């Protein structure tokens, strides 16, 4: 009895420790995802090889001849190969493993081939979207993953995409398009317009079919049916900024001018005016030309389906606590990865904003500090290059959102003595994150960019002293050589 | 006297017309080069260059949307071979990192080279001027008299210093991004050629409108700066013969210290 009691207590303690360890691991640092070997075979195959394999496996319909099969697979495979080799698709990482695990769970309880899950990948794209390719490859964008609210929603996204492939919607669209092209061969009959209309109308019915099938699979796998409605309601606002807190660019960059308060009031007025003056220009296209049906129609169709659900559905009992924890872990990793993506895409304003948001959760995380420092540095750099408009997003696209206000403030800050401001900003983070190579390096760089050659030299030398033989050493040596040359020329 | 003058005029009209047709039928093109101010001192050092996954893309807009890119993958290997041959002729050791020929454990490409290439293209596009904004000319007078500074970067486009250590892995600080991009379109008003100059115009009637671009961007990873970039264009197919002379000339200029 006593032994059982102690064993139970031990396991409870171990569980508590593991959970706290999972969350605490982001408090001070984050190790970005690194590609590890072996590279998946799909990445190493050319589009010809992929097509050959696809046709050999008879994934395409038997109704198509060999030439049509090639036409069906080849373009999709060509684009996929380019995507795989772009370095924007993760493999052998925690995020892909998690998403595949969710997919496998879904497939297992629906008696579907588990091999479908092996073709699911995560892409480093900020747009909230997931796509199915003709060979069954499914790409879930990182930008979609961070916006989802539960594992059930992720499972529905996967179920929806798998349903497209399982029901061969691509093939049906291809056959339809092929027949339409044949029928409207005369160029005077505006072939393209007819094809577009035919395909779009057809795609809408496919979306509804994938929704229904996905919802059915979701319930069989043990997820709640309302997850479907939750996701569909989320979709129209998924690209919006979910942040409701006002995040001030002034406060972030610690603006210290004496008249900052009065300036802030003016800026707030200005930003509101700027935002309202730059209202969105794009209007939604005609409903018939859209390949997805209206959200209202999808919600209505799902509500009917969920009300009339079959009673004989075998439910899997999900461990909801565990599912919540793993989902939360995966989305946190995705949030950190997103910062890297914003930075790599040269969206420095966005990177600064998203880093500042994440900083509220993890104020001592060095990775976030590095992202803040790098994005601030590149903003100064682009200001000096006179091409800031190419890296800052249009405020009009984010009207009435906190990000729009943040961008507006940032824009006004940039017009002032931005170099000095960022210099002191990076200097502060250098004191907080003393062990960071990147912050020390960017401090030296901002000194150099501000024309403080002596100070920059001092900081580069400090870098070599503190961090000998790092991946930046060759760069630092070269910068020191340039500064030395400049100083000699000045003399 | 009058008849003689008329004969000469008629004769020259024919010669003029013939020259016009030949000029139109021939290959026209342009060249734009921009480099860092200290390139003259660096050019002799470019003995070893690493070319990251050269791009070869042909878009045939005459075909259905799905099938426009299909010929591109075939040409990639031939393009890489041409680069190697011409680099050898100009005594440049060239290593072509071909993403289609990676082995199972070659994750260096995904961790560093692919994002590095992305950063080069981005810096090239966002900083100072981009190829799309470049007013390309092949006019000696315009280049040398009207804008003598246009050959040099005002500021060297900069990339993040994250990749400077690649110089130790590959034994050279010089990395290149090269590519060929070709667009084939159906010729507009081609019937006009057939009616205007029937025998010679037949070639113009059959031949589609082609625009081919060849570009090279060279980066010094130690200083994390773009030091050289060029873009050439010509109105012909991206065939082996057309590209060969262009690539040879490109390597000659890369090695030139002026």
Image (cartoon, coloured by chain):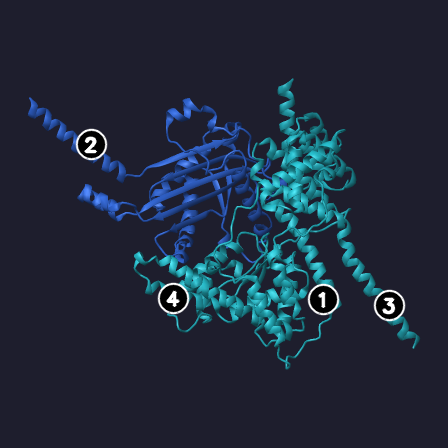
**Residue A127 marker:** none
Badge 3 vs badge 4, beta-carbon distance below 8 Å? no
Is residue A473 in sight in this rendering?
no
Q: Colour of chain A?
A: cyan
Mark 4 secondary-structure assignment = helix
Say what secondary structure mark 2 lies in.
Answer: helix
Closer to viewer: mark 4 or mark 1? 1
Tag of residue A323: 1
Q: Which residue is disc 4 drawn over?
A: A68
Where is residue A106? Give x, y as percent. Answer: 62, 71
Q: Which residue is mark 3?
A: A10
Chain in blue?
B
CA gap between label 2 and label 3 equals 98 Å
Letter of the chain that mark 4 sits on in the rendering:
A
Q: CA distance from mark 4 to mark 1?
A: 44 Å
User: Do the residues marked 3 and 4 share a common chain?
Assistant: yes
- Provide the residue designation for mark 2: B16
Q: Chain of mark 1?
A: A
Task: Name above or below for residue A112 compared with residue A441.
Answer: below
Between the C-alphas of marks 3 and 4, the distance is: 63 Å
Residue A237 in picture, x, y percent from top left: 62, 55
Residue A66 location (% of width, % of height): 38, 68
**In this orientation, which residue lies closer to the viewer: A5 or B225?**
A5
The C terminus of chain A is located in which quarter? top right
Give the mark toward the camera: 3 or 1. 1
Which of the 4 image quarters holds residue A276?
A: top right
């Amino acid at each position: 009895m006593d032994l059982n009691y102690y064993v139970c207590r031990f396991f409870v303690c171990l569980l508590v420790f593991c959970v706290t360890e999972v969350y605490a691991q982001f408090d001070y640092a984050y190790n970005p995802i690194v590609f590890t070997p072996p590279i998946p075979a799909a990445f190493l195959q050319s589009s010809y090889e992929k097509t050959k394999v696809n046709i050999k496996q008879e994934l395409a319909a038997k109704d198509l001849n060999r030439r049509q099969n090639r036409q069906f697979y080849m373009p999709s495979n060509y684009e996929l190969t380019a995507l795989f080799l772009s370095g924007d698709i993760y493999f052998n990482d925690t995020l892909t493993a998690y998403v595949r695990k969710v997919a496998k769970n879904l497939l297992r309880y629906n008696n579907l081939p588990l091999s479908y899950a092996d073709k699911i990948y995560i892409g480093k794209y900020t747009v909230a979207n997931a796509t199915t390719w003709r060979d069954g490859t499914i790409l879930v964008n990182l930008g979609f993953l961070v916006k989802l609210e539960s594992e059930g929603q992720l499972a529905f996204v996967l179920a929806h995409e798998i349903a497209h492939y399982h029901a061969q919607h691509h093939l049906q669209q291809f056959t339809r398009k092929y027949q339409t092209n044949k029928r409207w061969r005369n160029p005077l009959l505006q072939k393209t317009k007819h094809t577009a209309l035919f395909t779009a109308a057809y795609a809408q019915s496919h979306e509804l079919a994938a929704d229904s099938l996905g919802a059915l699979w979701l319930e069989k796998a043990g997820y709640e049916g309302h997850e479907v409605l939750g996701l569909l309601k989320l979709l129209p606002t998924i690209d919006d900024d979910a942040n409701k807190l006002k995040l001030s660019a002034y406060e972030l960059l610690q603006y210290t001018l004496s008249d900052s308060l009065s300036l802030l009031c003016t800026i707030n007025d200005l930003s509101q005016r700027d935002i309202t003056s730059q209202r969105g220009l794009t209007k939604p296209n005609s409903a018939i030309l859209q390949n997805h049906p209206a959200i209202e129609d999808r919600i209505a169709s799902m509500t009917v389906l969920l009300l009339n659900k079959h009673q004989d559905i075998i439910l899997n009992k999900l461990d909801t606590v565990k599912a919540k924890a793993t989902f939360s872990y995966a989305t946190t990793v995705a949030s950190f990865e997103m910062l890297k993506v914003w930075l790599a895409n040269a969206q420095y304003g966005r990177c600064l904003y998203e880093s500042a948001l994440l900083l509220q959760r993890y104020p001592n995380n060095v990775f976030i500090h590095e992202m803040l420092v790098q994005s601030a540095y590149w903003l100064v750099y682009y200001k000096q290059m006179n091409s800031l408009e190419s890296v800052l997003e249009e405020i009009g696209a984010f009207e009435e959102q906190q990000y729009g206000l943040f961008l507006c403030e940032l824009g006004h800050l940039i017009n002032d003595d931005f170099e000095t401001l960022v210099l002191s900003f990076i200097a502060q983070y250098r004191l907080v994150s003393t062990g960071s190579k990147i912050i020390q390096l960017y401090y030296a760089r901002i000194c150099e960019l501000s024309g403080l050659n002596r100070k920059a030299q001092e900081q580069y030398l400090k870098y070599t002293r503190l961090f000998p033989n790092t991946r930046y050493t060759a760069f630092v040596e070269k910068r020191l050589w340039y500064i030395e040359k400049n100083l000699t020329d000045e003399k | 006297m009058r008849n003689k003058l008329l004969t000469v005029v008629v004769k020259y009209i024919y010669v003029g017309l013939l020259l016009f047709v030949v000029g139109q039928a021939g290959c026209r093109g342009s060249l734009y080069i921009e480099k860092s101010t200290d390139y003259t001192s660096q050019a002799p050092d470019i003995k070893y260059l690493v070319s990251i996954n050269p791009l070869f893309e042909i878009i045939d807009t005459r075909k259905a949307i799905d099938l426009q890119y299909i010929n591109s993958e075939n040409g990639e290997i031939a393009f890489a071979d041409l680069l190697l041959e011409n680099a050898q002729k100009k005594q440049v050791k060239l290593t072509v990192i071909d993403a289609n020929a990676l082995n199972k454990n070659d994750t260096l490409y995904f961790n560093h080279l692919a994002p590095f290439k992305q950063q080069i293209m981005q810096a090239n596009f966002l900083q100072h001027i981009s190829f799309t904004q470049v007013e390309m000319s092949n006019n000696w007078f315009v280049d040398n008299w009207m804008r003598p500074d246009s050959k040099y970067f005002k500021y060297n486009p900069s990339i993040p210093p994250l990749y400077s250590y690649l110089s130790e892995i590959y034994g050279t600080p010089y990395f290149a991004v090269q590519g060929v991009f070709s667009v084939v379109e159906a010729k507009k008003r081609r019937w006009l050629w057939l009616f205007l100059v029937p025998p010679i115009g037949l070639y113009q009637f059959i031949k589609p409108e082609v625009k081919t671009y060849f570009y090279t961007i060279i980066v010094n990873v130690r200083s994390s700066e773009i030091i050289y970039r060029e873009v050439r264009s010509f109105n012909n197919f991206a065939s082996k013969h057309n590209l060969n002379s262009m690539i040879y000339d490109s390597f000659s200029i890369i090695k030139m210290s002026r």
